[in-house]
Image: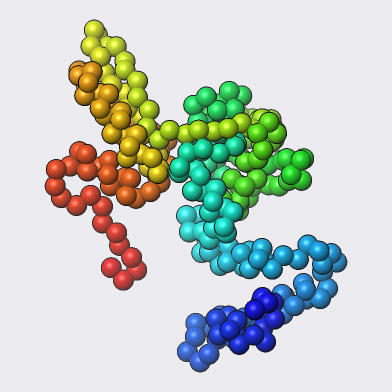
Amino acid sequence: IRLGKETSPVVNRFVGNPSTGAVAGADFSRFWEVWQRLEKSYVDPSKIDYAKMTWGAMEGLSQSLDDPYTQYLPPKENKQATEDLNGSFYGVGIELGYKDNTLAVVAPITGSPAEKVGVKASDLILHIKDEAKKVDIDTRGMTLPTAVTYIRGEKGTAVILTLYREGGEKSFEQTIVRDEIVVPSVELKFIEKNGKKVAHLELHKFGGRTDREWIAKVSEIVAIHPAGVVLDLRNNPGGYLDGAVFVTSEFLSSGVVVKQEGRNS
């Protein structure tokens, strides 16, 4: 099947003009008209990539809902999202999110290139520039996976972020050199206060290694017998649901940890 040729009966079965009773407005005739015009008339045919065009259409469907947390992830972006949760990649070390619908820094990762140059939590990311990757783009309307694609890159290469910090008079550019980022989901340190030792347990995300990292750190706490434990969830952007359920279950002996509801619940 060659995508772009609506004459294929298999393609028509899924994306041809809707039959009677289909959702009003779901007429693919204009979609195929645009597709064919690009095929026949785009000035540089070498840039036509049918997979990217298809993924772009799917991204557009999810973006039309105006919900930044409902996204379609093409294979490359999906791989990056998985790397994020599992903990090792080349980048600048920024946990991304949104603030007032604008791309923002949730938190710089401890010891990362971003932290070393002074990037702070809640900084807004307005523009991304990378001459080597030929990227020079505003972030308005940008999805998290797309932003990750632009900001990550080879070790030792630089990316320029235009940031705005609350209280500042204007935005500013920050050049950051990429490096390997290894991100533990759980970190532990002990703090002395009034002659007593307190465990400070930071839970950065609910990732693929959270269960075993959590068990290891809790074992350290049990061995030390501190006077108290502080569980720090600040700047935790979330992650795998089962990881969150696992950690919550450490504190609850019974009952419902989480309840999922859908449109028909």
Residue closest to the eye, 145 or 29: 145
Q: Quadrant of residue 46?
A: bottom right
Question: Is residue 4 placed above or below 142 in the rendered structure?
Answer: below
Question: Is residue 14 placed above or below 160 in the rendered structure?
Answer: below
The quadrant of the picture occupied by the C terminus is bottom left
Question: Is residue 131 placed above or below 3 in the rendered structure?
Answer: above
The residue drawn where x is 54% and y is 51% is: 79
Is 122 on the left-hand or right-hand side of 192?
right
The residue drawn where x is 68% and y is 41% is: 128
Residue closest to the eye, 210 or 139: 210
Q: Quadrant of residue 202?
A: top left
Outermost bottom residue: 20
Outermost right residue: 43
Is 253 on the left-hand or right-hand side of 209?
left
Q: Indicate the position of residue 139 as horizontal and vertical percent values.
A: 64, 47
Q: Indicate the position of residue 2 as horizontal and vertical percent values.
A: 68, 77
The residue drawn where x is 82% and y is 67% is: 45
Residue 255 visible, this angle: yes
The quadrant of the picture occupied by the N terminus is bottom right
Tally the numbered discs. Answer: 0
Outermost left residue: 254
Q: Indicate the position of residue 147 as horizontal and vertical percent values.
A: 60, 47
Q: Quadrant of residue 198?
A: top left
Q: Indicate the position of residue 135 as horizontal and vertical percent values.
A: 73, 46
The residue drawn where x is 70% and y is 34% is: 157
Is 115 on the left-hand or right-hand side of 43?
left
Residue closest to the eye, 29 or 124: 29
